[in-house]
Image (tube, rainbow, N blue to C red):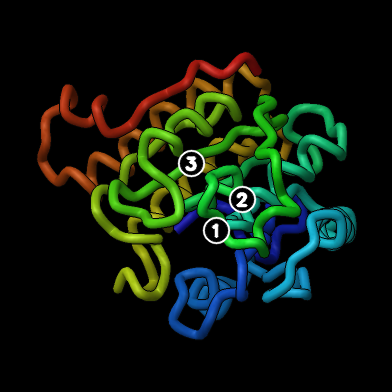
């Protein structure tokens, strides 16, 4: 578990940001909310007919009301809501959002994208003003692995190839998703010092690269060599 105690008001809290249709009872976001006292869902509403501005407004309200550093754990279309919030909010680096885990982002720009996703076009391609990790599956029907890596590069995110696990949702059979928890806890450790103060951009980038690589190597690669780990975990060298 993370070093941050849920009763320490200087510690980051985790806000989950579901995608189209919300996250059901077996989704890892729901399971995290139920098992972690530091984790809460952003109720975006309009789950089946999402509107970009409405979702971004709801997300902004949740972030502002948190009264603590925030780490976002977004899935699918929720990743686009986070990217649009970052584009429109104009926050300084690392505050109020101290980091984000962006899982299986949806490709809203592809020709075959459902009409419900069109309101989120075009996908923002600007650097995110907080440390972030993009996790993608090699057989995700919503976005190709190459497109996911390009997206991570544009956002300045560390990129994690999770292998063939579908859309990294309940249907993937990952349950509580311990691998994701490991990445989240590394991100929390990166986001702030034990005192609760936000790290500098250089510190955050360096620590996130080390922490996320360690977590992914342990969970996705077992005893694989560091060279193999480097092929799975790719740093975009973000200009933070």
Cβ–Cβ under 8 Å for marks 2 and 3: yes
Q: Position of residue 4 (x, y in %)?
A: 59, 54
**Residue 208 seen from this side:** no
Helix, strand or loop at label 1? It is: strand
In this rendering, is residue 41 above or below 193? below
Residue 134: mark: 3
Cβ–Cβ under 8 Å for marks 3 and 1: no
Residue in view at x 53 percent, y 82 percent: 24
Residue that badge 1 annotates? 75
Task: Count residues near mark 2 (Cα–Cα under 10 Å), then give few for <14, some for 14-19, many for 20+.
Answer: many
Residue in view at x 46 percent, y 75 percent: 27
In this rendering, is residue 207 above or below 83? above
In this rendering, is residue 20 above or below 206? below
Left or right of 16: which side holds 232? left
Q: 45 and 211: which one is in front?
A: 45
Q: 226 and 161: which one is in front?
A: 161
Residue in view at x 86 percent, y 55 percent: 53
Q: Position of residue 107 (x, y in %)?
A: 53, 47
CA–CA distance in space, label 3 to label 1: 10 Å
Residue that badge 2 annotates? 79
CA–CA distance in space, label 2 to label 3: 9 Å
Cβ–Cβ under 8 Å for marks 2 and 1: yes
Q: Position of residue 212 (x, y in %)?
A: 40, 37
């Amino acid at each position: 578990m993370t070093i941050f105690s849920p009763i320490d008001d200087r510690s980051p809290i985790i806000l989950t940001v579901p995608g189209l249709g919300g996250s059901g009872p077996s989704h890892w976001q729901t399971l995290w909310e139920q098992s972690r006292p530091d984790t809460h869902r952003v109720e975006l509403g309009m789950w089946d007919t999402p509107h970009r501005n409405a979702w971004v407004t709801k997300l902004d309200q949740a972030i502002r009301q948190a009264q603590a550093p925030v780490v976002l754990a977004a899935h699918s279309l929720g990743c686009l809501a986070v990217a649009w919030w970052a584009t429109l909010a104009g926050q300084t680096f690392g505050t109020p959002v101290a980091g984000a885990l962006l899982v299986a982002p949806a490709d809203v720009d592809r020709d075959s994208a459902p009409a419900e996703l069109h309101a989120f076009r075009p996908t923002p391609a600007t650097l995110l003003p907080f440390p972030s990790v993009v996790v993608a599956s090699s057989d995700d029907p919503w976005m190709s692995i190459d497109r996911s890596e390009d997206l991570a590069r544009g956002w300045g995110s560390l990129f994690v190839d999770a292998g063939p696990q579908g859309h990294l949702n309940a249907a993937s059979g990952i349950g509580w998703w311990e691998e994701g928890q490991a990445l989240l806890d590394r991100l929390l450790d990166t986001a702030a010092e034990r005192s609760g103060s936000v790290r500098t951009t250089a510190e955050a980038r360096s620590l996130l690269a080390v922490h996320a690589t360690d977590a992914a190597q342990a969970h996705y690669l077992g005893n694989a060599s560091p060279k193999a780990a480097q092929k799975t975990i790719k740093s975009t060298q973000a200009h933070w």
